Amino acid sequence: MTHHIDNRQLGKTQSRAVIDVAAHCQKNGVDKAQERKLLTLLGRFASRHELQMNIKRNPKNLR
């Protein structure tokens, strides 16, 4: 169920920081295929939490 949100009720502390998906991927060493997947899924901008939850990282130490 959806409902109307009044913009006046939202304070400045409730806003989310939005970052550029491509810049985040380059900064954190995400490969190009994963970057394309994130751009398709999230669009050009996303919150840090959305990026962290959708990035799949391979384990560094395989035994």
Image: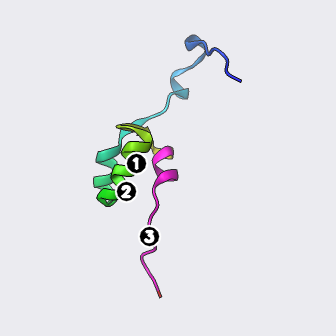
Q: Which mark is residue 38?
A: 1
Looking at the rendered image, the disc whose residue lies closer to the viewer, 2 or 3, is: 2
The kind of secondary structure element at disc 2 is helix
Stretch of the chain drawn in magenta: 50-62
Residue 45 in picture, x, y percent from top left: 38, 36
Q: Residue at x 49, y 32 (%)?
A: 16
- Marks 1 and 2 sit apart, C-alpha to C-alpha, by 6 Å
Kindly check if marks 1 and 2 are in contact, taking CB atoms under 8 A apart as contact.
Answer: yes
Crowd band around label 1 with a 10 angstrom C-alpha radius: few (<14), some (14–19), many (20+): many
> Where is residue 29, by image quadrant?
bottom left
Residue 60 in picture, x, y percent from top left: 42, 76
The reply, left or right, for residue 55 in relation to residue 39 is right
Q: Secondary structure of the magenta portion, mostly?
A: loop
Q: Residue at x 46, y 61 (%)?
A: 56
- Marks 2 and 3 sit apart, C-alpha to C-alpha, by 11 Å
Observer-nearest residue: 1 or 8? 1
The kind of secondary structure element at disc 3 is loop
Observer-nearest residue: 53 or 32? 32
The reply, left or right, for residue 51 in relation to residue 25 is right
Locate the N terminus and report the quarter of the image it occupies.
top right
| Magenta highlight on residue 47 | no
Q: Relative to residue 31, is residue 17 depicted above or below?
A: above
Q: Relative to residue 45, is residue 4 depicted above or below?
A: above
Determine which residue is flagged by label 2: 34
Q: Describe the colour scheme in one phrase.
A: rainbow
Determine which residue is flagged by label 3: 58
Q: Residue at x 39, y 51 (%)?
A: 37
Q: Earlier in the sequence, mark 2 or mark 3?
A: 2
Kindly identify the amino acid type of the residue bearing the numbered disc 2.
Answer: Gln
Q: How many marks?
A: 3
The kind of secondary structure element at disc 1 is helix
Q: Residue at x 44, y 70 (%)?
A: 58
